[in-house]
C-alpha cells in the first residue's frame, strides 16, 4: 500500500513534484474533459477553522470539476472544536468520512498535529501566520505561466512579512530555484522572521531589506503585495498605525519594468488601489484562477491518480516522533499562537537548527529557543 502523503510545508514536495503539478495543471486547463470523472466516488473534506473565500472554494470547485464530492465546514463555530475537541481527534474522525482533507487553522503547527493521526492525505490550507503551501503552488503556477520560468528572478515581497504565511512558504519554494533574489519590503515592526532569513542565508540566497516600495520597484520582476492582517495583531492601535504602510497605485507603478508582474494572494483591503486592476501587469485575479487548476493537480497527485514524480519528504511532515533521537522534549514553546499552547496533550518538541548560535526551533510553529552558553 502507498504511504500517505501530506502537504504541510511546500518543502514536502520536491522540485520535480512541483514541476509535475505545474504540467498537470496546464494540461487540466487545456483538456478539462480528460479529468472530468477521475475523482468519481472520492470525497474531499474542507475543515476551515478560520475564514476563507479563495482557498476553500477553489478546493471545493477543484474536487467537483474532477467528478468528486465535498463535505466539511467553513466556520469553527459549527464544529465540535467549540466543545473542546482536539485537532487530532477531529482529523481521526473525518478520516472515516473523506478520502482527502484540506484544513485551515488559526494555530501555528496545527496541521503537524493533525498529520500525526490522519489515515488519509491532509493538506495544510494555512496555519496561522506560519505556512500556506497551496497558495505557494498557486503563486508558482502563476509565475510559470506569466514569466515562463521560475529561476533568474528578482522577487519583491511587500507588506506584512512577519505574519504573512504566504510569503514564508513562497520563500521556502523559490530558494530551490537558481538565481532568485529577494527584496524584503516592510515596516520595521513587520519584518521577515529570523527563521525565514536563516533559511535564505543557509541557501546562500541574495536578499536585501528595505522600508520603501518606491526605491525597490524598478529592479523587480515580481512584486508580491500582501495585506496587513488585522486578525494577527494583539494591539488595535498598532494595526491602525501600520495598516496603510503601502498602497500600490498607478503612479508608483510608473518606474517598474514593463514585464514586471504584480501578485497578491488576496483578499486585499487597500494595499493595491483598484486603478491598478486595469494595468496588464496586475495578475492577482488570474492568480486565483490558477489556484483552482493547481489544487486539482494536487488532489490527483495525493490520491495517486497521476504517476509519481521524485518523491519528497517521508510523509510530508507531521511525524516528529519518528525523529525523536534528534529532538528535545525539555523545552516549552513560548509562542502563544502555537498549537501546543491550546492542545495540552501534545508533546513540546524542539530541533536544533543552528548549533553555533544554540538556536532550537519548535517542530510545530518554528518558535525560537536560544540555549544559554
Ligand atoms: N489567498 C487566500 O488564502 O485567500 P482566502 O483567505 O480567501 O482563502
Image (tube, rainbow, N blue to C red):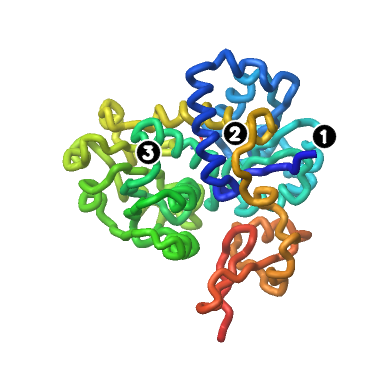
Q: Earlier in the sequence, mark 2 or mark 3?
A: 3
Q: Residues within 10 Å of mark 1 (few under 14, many from 20)?
A: few
* Measured Cα–Cα span from mark 2 to mark 3: 20 Å
The answer to which quarter of the image holds residue 301 is: top right
Whether disc 1's CB lies below 8 Å from ligand 1 is answered no
Q: Is the C-beta separation of discs 2 and 1 under 8 Å? A: no
Q: Secondary structure at mark 3?
A: loop
For image coordinates 60% across by 39% down, the residue present is: 309
Tag 3–tag 1 contact (CB < 8 Å): no
In the depicted structure, whether residue 109 falls above or below residue 96: below
- What crowding class fits label 3: few (fewer than 14 Cα within 10 Å), some (14-19), or many (20 or more)? few
Label 2 crowd (10 A; few <14 / some 14-19 / many >=20): many
Residue 96: image tag = 1
Instruction: Report the mark closest to the observer, 2 or 3.
Output: 3
The earlier-in-sequence mark between 3 and 1 is 1
**Which residue is drawn at the image coordinates 31% and 36% (left, top)?**
261
- For the point 69% across and 52% down, which residue is it? 318
**Marks 2/1: CA–CA distance:** 21 Å
**Viewer-side label of 3, 1:** 3
Q: Quadrant of the N terminus?
A: top right
Label 2 or label 1, whichever lies nearer to me, is 2
Earlier-in-chain disc, 2 versus 1:
1
- Which of the numbered marks, if any, corresponds to residue 149? 3
Left or right: 156 as drawn, with respect to 367: left
Q: Position of residue 171 (x, y in %)?
A: 44, 51
Image position, residue 277 (x, y; %): 30, 28
Q: Which residue is identified by label 2?
A: 298
Name the residue nearer the viewer: 340 or 261.
Answer: 261
Among the 4 quarters of the image, the one containing residue 258:
top left
Amino acid at each position: 500500500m502507498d504511504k500517505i502523503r501530506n502537504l504541510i510545508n511546500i518543502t514536502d514536495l520536491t522540485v520535480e513534484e512541483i514541476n509535475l503539478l505545474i504540467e498537470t495543471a496546464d494540461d487540466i486547463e487545456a483538456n478539462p474533459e480528460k479529468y472530468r470523472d477521475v475523482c468519481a466516488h472520492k470525497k474531499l473534506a474542507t475543515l476551515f477553522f478560520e475564514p476563507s473565500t479563495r482557498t476553500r472554494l477553489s478546493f471545493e470547485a477543484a474536487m467537483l470539476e474532477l467528478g468528486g464530492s465535498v463535505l466539511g465546514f467553513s466556520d469553527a463555530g459549527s464544529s465540535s472544536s467549540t466543545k473542546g475537541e482536539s485537532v487530532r481527534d477531529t482529523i481521526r474522525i473525518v478520516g472515516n468520512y473523506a478520502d482527502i482533507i484540506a484544513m485551515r487553522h488559526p494555530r501555528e503547527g496545527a496541521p503537524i498535529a493533525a498529520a500525526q493521526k490522519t489515515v488519509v492525505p491532509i493538506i495544510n490550507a494555512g496555519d496561522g501566520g506560519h505556512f500556506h503551501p497551496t497558495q505557494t503552488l498557486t503563486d508558482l503556477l502563476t509565475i510559470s505561466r506569466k514569466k515562463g520560468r521560475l529561476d533568474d528572478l528578482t522577487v519583491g515581497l511587500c507588506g506584512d512579512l512577519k505574519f504573512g504565511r504566504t510569503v514564508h512558504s513562497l520563500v521556502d519554494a523559490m530558494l530551490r530555484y537558481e538565481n532568485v533574489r529577494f527584496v524584503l519590503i516592510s515596516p520595521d515592526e513587520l519584518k521577515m522572521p529570523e527563521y525565514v532569513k536563516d533559511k535564505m542565508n543557509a541557501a546562500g540566497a541574495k536578499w536585501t531589506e528595505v522600508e520603501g516600495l518606491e526605491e525597490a520597484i524598478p529592479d523587480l520582476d515580481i512584486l508580491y503585495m500582501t495585506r496587513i492582517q488585522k486578525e494577527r495583531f494583539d494591539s488595535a492601535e498598532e494595526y491602525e498605525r501600520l495598516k496603510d504602510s503601502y498602497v500600490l497605485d498607478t503612479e508608483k507603478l510608473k518606474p517598474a519594468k514593463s514585464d514586471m508582474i504584480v501578485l497578491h494572494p488576496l483578499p486585499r483591503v487597500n494595499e493595491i488601489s483598484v486603478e491598478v486592476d486595469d494595468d496588464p501587469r496586475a495578475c492577482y485575479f488570474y492568480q486565483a484562477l490558477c489556484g483552482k487548476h493547481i489544487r486539482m493537480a494536487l488532489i490527483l497527485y495525493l490520491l495517486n491518480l497521476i504517476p509519481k514524480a521524485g518523491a519528497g519528504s517521508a510523509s510530508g511532515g507531521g511525524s516528529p516522533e519518528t525523529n525523536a533521537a534528534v529532538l528535545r522534549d525539555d523545552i516549552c514553546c513560548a509562542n502563544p499562537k502555537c498549537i501546543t499552547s491550546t492542545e495540552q496533550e501534545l508533546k513540546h518538541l524542539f530541533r536544533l537548527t543552528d548549533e553555533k548560535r544554540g538556536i532550537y526551533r519548535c517542530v510545530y510553529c518554528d518558535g525560537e529557543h536560544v540555549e544559554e552558553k
